[in-house]
Amino acid sequence: MSKQSGRGRVAGLPDWDRCAVMGVVNVTPDSFSDGGRWFDTTAAVKHGLALVTEGADLVDVGGESTRPGATRVDEAEELRRVIPVVRGLASEGVVVSVDTMRASVAAQALAAGAALVNDVSGGLADPEMIPVVADAGAPFVVMHWRGFLEGGNVQGVYGDVVREVVDELHARVDAVLAGGIAPDRLVVDPGLGFSKEAGHDLSLLAHLDRLHGLGHPLLVAASRKRFLGRVLAGPQGAPPPARERDAATAAVSALAAQAGAWAVRVHEVRATADAVRVARAVEGACTDGHTPGAGTAVGAHNTPDAPAPHDTRPSDTPHGPEGAR
């Protein structure tokens, strides 16, 4: 089976013949890598459109930082941040994902044109989330999650991180399916950086095949996370700032695409868009037995699978598991 055929498709979303690129729009003042840059609605919509121009296939809009120690925003504020941006991007034909743990935000975002709900808690933070998504018939991302990263609640201790993450995700997938979400609309995410140290993240990336065993398309969200800073710094060095980890992110995107990921979630799109297209070209050369000629869609941003022109997670705190967007 080729990687392309094995990465799966998600009902209700476009079919991409390669690993898709999910760009990040953080409508927050405090996200770890770009908090405040797109806090204004107009700026956030403009940024989302720019990400599509650079090669994003879909755009993930979130209004709440999940970095360790972050104070949760109230429902009204999250709605104020997110809904106008979702509506603005959807009206331009962008495939929009909403990054939220609240069922009310998911419901209003879907009504405003969002096509996908990306819940870092996998429906655990709000018991109404699964019924809302099931009733809407929307695709849903289930991430591995061990609770809010507040105070000492990091729960980052594992005996066998790959086995435990797979087992815990399997249990959560079963619960989500029992709640009425269709199997062909379910995506899984190993939750890199959430209640995990750098070694845990690397082990999960090295064993994405085990996550494929869950039988659902896989989203990999490694962008700018602290484990990449640890790798780049080496044993004694200081990790580079989050925005200096984009080349490393693109490298992970290429590896994830080669391993059959359905999509990668990134802050800086252009390099990753090139990386996944090169990975697809290599897959094609392996399966088709020929080398793409000049003018084929290798790293081009105006190819048929790239839309025409039309960030809310890991903490960069110096200690402990990062777990944010």
Image (cartoon, rainbow, N blue to C red):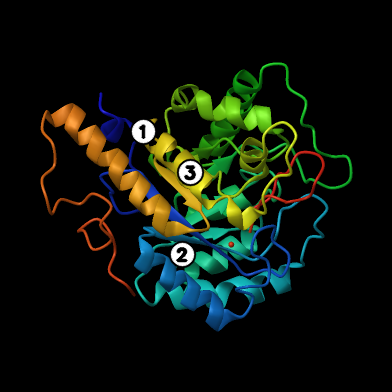
Find residue 149 and report its image quarter: top right
The percent coordinates of residue 124 (x first, y second) are 68, 43
Q: Nearer the viewer, residue 265 or 178?
A: 265
The percent coordinates of residue 113 (x first, y second) are 44, 69
**Label 1 vs label 3: CA separation?**
28 Å
Please tell me whether mark 3 sits on a helix, a strand or a loop. loop
Q: Residue at x 69, y 40 (%)?
A: 194
Which is more N-terminal, label 1 or label 2?
2
> Left of 51 or right of it: where is 66?
right
- Residue bearing the label numbered 3: 181
Which is more N-terminal, label 2 or label 3?
2
Q: Residue at x 79, y 32 (%)?
A: 155
Find residue 256 and report its image quarter: top left
* Numbered tag placed on residue 258 in the rendering: 1
Callout in the foreground (1, 3): 1
Please tell me whether mark 2 sits on a helix, a strand or a loop. loop
Callout in the foreground (2, 1): 1
Q: Nearer the viewer, residue 117 or 2?
A: 2
Residue extending furthest right? 151
Q: Nearer the viewer, residue 133 or 227?
A: 227
- Residue bearing the label numbered 2: 114
Callout in the foreground (3, 2): 2
Question: 97 above or below 177?
Answer: below
Q: Using a 10 Å C-alpha cutoff, classify the residue at mark 2 as few (fewer than 14 neighbours), some (14 to 19) or many (20 or more).
A: many
Which is more N-terminal, label 3 or label 1?
3
Q: Using a 10 Å C-alpha cutoff, classify the residue at mark 1 as few (fewer than 14 neighbours), some (14 to 19) or many (20 or more).
A: many
Residue extending furthest bottom? 42
Q: Are marks 3 and 2 in contact (CB under 8 Å)?
A: no
Please tell me whether mark 1 sits on a helix, a strand or a loop. helix
**Label 2 vs label 1: CA separation?**
28 Å
